[in-house]
Image (tube, rainbow, N blue to C red):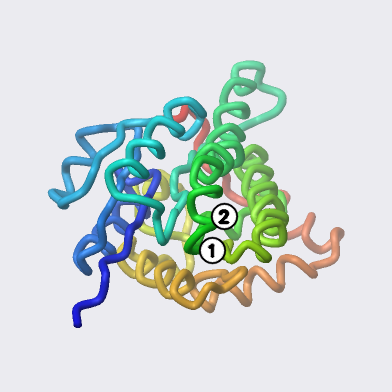
Amino acid sequence: MASTPLKVFITGASSGLGAALARHYGTSGAQLGLAGRRLEGLQAAGLDARLYPADVRDAAAMRTAAEAFLSEVGPPDIVIAAAGISVGTLTEAGEDAAVFRAVMDANVLGLVHTFQPFIAPMQTSGGVLCGISSVAGVRGLPGGGAYSASKAAATVYLEALRLELKARGIAVVTVAPGYIDTPMTRVNPYAMPFKMTAAAAAAKVAHCIARRRAYTVIPWQMAWVARLLKWLPIPVYDVVFEKAPRKPRGLPT
């Protein structure tokens, strides 16, 4: 007897990792709901999917998208919050205040806006909420204060959510990637060790979801780097990273 197709809702699906995840699940026959800021990006994959042009920073828009998916498809088996903003910032630059807010709104509150409408409907059948964090959240990176802070906050938020929902049968999976070859990273003016293709990263994320792993750094080489960074003494970390190359500043796109 044929298995029932997975019902999967993905944010950030108009480009990068989100688009790769859409292709990964779409080619396996999943019933997809794809949310993103750019409709043309959602359409570009050519997948049989329900498309929801929406910005994760907009709680009302995300609730509308979720309600449409629930009405048309039903409670999802998997919700993946892959939308995010990565851009360099400087606290001393007054014009970067708005950028800080955009990054925090997308990378932290975007998780809340994505998951909240689905929690009650998913309680009847369980399922997985997956949030994409980053190795950049392990320590503060110079020139990347907004991004590092947002991903550190995302990791801790997802941990709290995991404990809140455990008794209700909903798994919360946190995946912290290293470098992925996407438009977001192609502007980086520095070497990116252990860089993954978006397709390879999507396959690893899907594996973590299938195993319901609480927290995973991908790839495995970057997991060792993350452990080292976490326990590196502050004086040593400061010497090594004070003059590290920085991500370009600019307005989020």
Residue at mark 2: 133
The residue at the far top in this view is 94
Apparent side of residue 150 relative to residue 39 in the rendered image (left or right): right
Front position in the image: 129 or 40: 129
Apparent side of residue 122 relative to residue 25 in the rendered image (left or right): right
Instruction: Locate the N terminus and report the quarter of the image it occupies.
Output: bottom left
Q: In which quarter of the image is residue 176?
A: bottom right
In the rendered view, would you say 20 is above or below 90?
A: below
Amino acid tagged 1: Val
Residue at mark 1: 175
Binning the other alpha carbons within 10 Å of mark 2 as few (below 14), some (14 to 19) or many (20 upward) gives: many
For residue 228, the mark is: none
Instruction: Locate the C terminus and report the quarter of the image it occupies.
Output: top left
Apparent side of residue 181 relative to residue 50 in the rendered image (left or right): right
Q: Tag 1's secondary structure?
A: strand
The residue at the far left in this view is 46
Apparent side of residue 222 relative to residue 155 in the rendered image (left or right): left
Q: Indicate the position of residue 115 as horizontal and vertical percent values.
A: 53, 46
Residue drawn at 29 percent across, 32 percent down: 38
Q: Indicate the position of residue 96 as horizontal and vertical percent values.
A: 61, 23
Amino acid tagged 2: Ser
Q: Indicate the position of residue 25 as horizontal and vertical percent values.
A: 28, 63
Residue drawn at 33 percent across, 43 percent down: 69
Residue drawn at 61 percent across, 41 percent down: 108
Spatial separation of the CA atoms under disc 2 and disc 1: 6 Å
Q: How many marks?
A: 2
Circle 2/circle 1 CB separation < 8 Å: yes
Q: Indicate the position of residue 168 as horizontal and vertical percent values.
A: 63, 62
In the rendered view, would you say 143 is above or below 91?
A: below
